[in-house]
Image (cartoon, coloured by chain):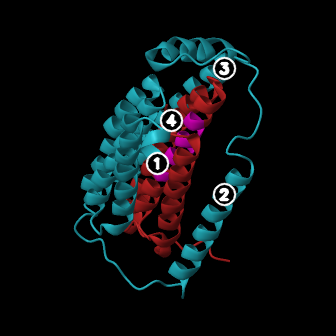
Amino acid sequence: MNVPASWYLVLAAMLFGVGAFGLLTRRSALIMFMCLELMLNAVNLTFVTFSRTMSDIGGQATVFFVMVVAAAEVTVGLGIVVAIFRRRSSTSVDELSEMKG
Amino acid sequence: MLALSYALPSILIFITAALLILVGAVGVLAFKNPVHSALSLIMTLLGVAVAFIAQSADFLAAVQIIVYAGAIVVLFLFVIMFLGVDRNDTVRVDPLVGQRAFAGVGVVITVGGLIALMARSNWVTGAMSVSTSGVALAPGSGNVQQLGTAVFTTYIFAFEVTAALLIIAVVGAVLLARRERTSDESKS
């Protein structure tokens, strides 16, 4: 018998927490993108776990679409990082303060 | 006691996946060099793929390796090397006082609340989707066919939209990355 779903759900929650902590504390835009990927993977793991528990393929189909959206998001996000780096020579999000109110 | 309740291989696989995932995730945060963080990210993605296989999501595990570890992380590494930020990643004092502490407390509250919420609802919430109600998920590689059927019938509209999304993302990325150079060329 496979391990219970709760183990994987707790693991996914911890992975999400680590990713969220990194997103909130790191200053480099590149590292923040990586932490975003960690959080997306945690949610994917939760989807797959519930897909197994409820015996429903819809969870796995959703993970498929999440992966596509994550790939598109990383492509555009890294394009923005490259564009900003050319102008500012830095990827630190603290130095992007032109729009401060 | 655990070994009596559940099969030992599944426990070992879970421990392996958990170690890969958590060590890799902490490594993403802990390493100062972005290249090391990206390599640590690969470790986490492999761990997630192991967890996918353990839960009979074979196709998603393959996509996880190919798309995430093969494409997204390589894209990260390409941008890191292209920008050369691996040499001058300065670690400075936090501009916001107590940001780390507040982030830690907030994350602990969020994760703890999440786990408590799931534990109270017996770890299963929500309803079955309309697609395969009543149809049992085939174990092992048998559900690749189920997944293909679901994606190309029930979720066909979402599938077509993702095609448009990918085209838009590629065009947007090319536009963002090339604008500077074309304006320089027009000036000179």
- For marks 1 and 2, give the CA distance: 27 Å
Q: Secondary structure at mark 2?
A: helix
The amino acid beneath tag 2 is Leu
Q: Which residue is labeled 3 in the image?
A: B155
Q: Amino acid at mark 4?
A: Met
Q: Which residues are the magenta region?
A: A37-49
Residue of label 1: B1
Compared to residue A94, the image places residue B167 above or below, namely above
Residue B131 locus on image (x, y percent): 71, 18
Label 3 chain ID: B
Q: Which residue is mark 4?
A: A67
Mark 4 and mark 3: Cα distance apart in space: 15 Å
SS class, disc 3: loop
| Residue B185 in view (yes/no) | no
Front label number (2 vs 3):
2
Left or right of B7 in this view: B79: left
**Mark 3 Cα within 10 Å, few/some/many (few <14, many 20+)?**
some
Residue indicated by mark 2: B114
Asked whether disc 2 touches disc 4, contact meaning CB atoms under 8 Å apart, the reply is no
